[in-house]
Image: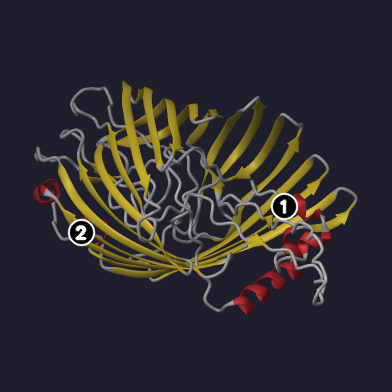
Amino acid sequence: MASLAAAVVALAIQTDPATPPTVIPAKAGIHSPVRSKQKPIRRPQWIPAFAGMTAIGEGQAAPTPSPAPEAWQAPTLSITRYDEDWSDLADAKKRAHHWTGPFKHIPLGGDAWLSTGIEVRLRSESFANNTLGNAASPDDTYLWTRVLPYADLHVGHVRAVAQPILAYAAGVRPAAGPVDQTRTDLLQGFAELDLGAVTLRGGRQMLSLGTERLIGTRYGPNVPLAFDGVRGIVAVGRARISLLAVAPVAPRLGTFDDRTSPTKRLWGAYAVLPSIDLYYLGYRNRTAQFGDRTGRELRHSFGARVYGARDNWHWNIEGVAQFGRFADGPIAAWTLGTELGRKLPNLPFAPDAVLRFNVISGDGHAGDRRLGTFNALFPKGKYFGELSPVGPYNLINLNPRIAGTLGGGVSASIAGSAYWRYATADGVYDIPGNLLRAPSTSRARFIGKQIEGAIAWQATAELELSASLSFFQAGRFLRETGAPRPIRMIGLESNFRF
């Protein structure tokens, strides 16, 4: 295995010293960032070699050509990696069509075979007035480095997946946290049994449900999120139902010291049907905190997502209602996210214009025992864009976006966001749910506005370079409760993945 990993790295270096991230195709999704990191990346097209050509002399009738074989389409590369199917490469001729073929399907004899791959990502972020300009958040420029090799072993109906992570950070002030750096650890490691209509999986794995509004991979930051536990996937007609009972993995700063969270648990069912998702998620946290209250949280989330496309229109609407208990009182929270987009293929650069509008409940009465603040559980890491200064709690958000292709593998987008507090008795939170600004005595709702541009170059099927520029200006609520300085961020990223 060590020699195989070394060969993979050597090939990566020989291909190109600059290793960019991969452009991710647009897909309808609530709260998708300007360049969403939670969606599958482009798949390479493996073109078969030309057959021998027949010379045709003058005066000879041309023979009827045989139909050219279609290029085999490699599966879409995904963030979780375990949902890629490379079984077609059992055909040795198909493996020879692309340099990655021998790595994606390694025959081991009988019905056993191994698939391997790797991701190498470098990301630099430069901030001015980070975290809403608080005095404790200095200007900062840091570098994230992440390497994610993986091996996927198939033996008949049994499967085993292992994916270590090497994640390091340089320059984070005042110090790197566990989401910046976990050194060397196990990101994913599970066994799976395929029983036909039922698949059983146990161990450590990343989860990506729907648009990752509640359960995501946290792919944008340096250390993704994984869960320990069991998952069953049941196919019933055209429906696919995931049943899960897991606990999040709490990353730590040392090597091989990540542990299952001792305080948090997640369980539920997520059903995917044509054009609609239905789900229930149960969540428990023994040490929850909202505002100045702490206690045990037991929360039940019931959600539905309706999505689709027709002609050049596409849409995505998702609603969630939450009930349960927190500390000594009840929970009653909700959210509604809407997205409407239209592709304009006849215009220059074939733009796709999207408008998102989201309402997320907050706690309207701080003095009573009832909690109205929505809990996003384990959402995507870059929630509203490359710069996401606030998280999906107690929020009204308007987010227009337009993206297009410039040719030569280059794509670009520009987006704006405006943020308001839903309830003036509640504050402003970050993406993990930590309170950034208490409501104080301010009755203002407007938090601030943001503009962000991004550009990405898909150099090859495995290689991408990207850059983003973001600017956030504080609104009245932030000016009345603290430093009103604007936030500026430049993000540069390179990613090599196969």
Give left or right: position of 206 versus 86.
Answer: left
Residue 464, image x and y in percent? 50, 67
Q: Nearer the viewer, residue 282 or 420?
A: 420
Res 455 → quadrant: bottom left
Kindly indicate the quadrant of the structure image that contains residue 440.
top left
Q: Residue drawn at (38%, 58%), measured in percent from left and top?
A: 404
Res. 432 visible in picture: no
Q: Is residue 10 visible?
A: yes
Q: Secondary structure at mark 2?
A: helix
- For the point 13% across and 56% down, the residue is 484
Q: Is residue 57 above or below residue 211?
A: below
The residue beneath circle 1 is 86
- Establish if 312 lies above or below 273: below
Q: Amino acid at mark 1?
A: Trp
Of badges 1 and 2, the one in the foreground is 1
Mark 2: which amino acid? Gly
271 vs 111, left or right, is left
Q: How is the image coloured?
A: secondary structure
What residue did someone put label 2 on? 133
Q: Secondary structure at mark 1?
A: loop
Judge the density around disc 1: few (<14), some (14-19), many (≥20) Cα neighbours within 10 Å: some
Q: Quadrant of the N terminus?
A: bottom right
Q: Which mark is residue 251?
A: none
Q: Residue furthest front?
A: 59
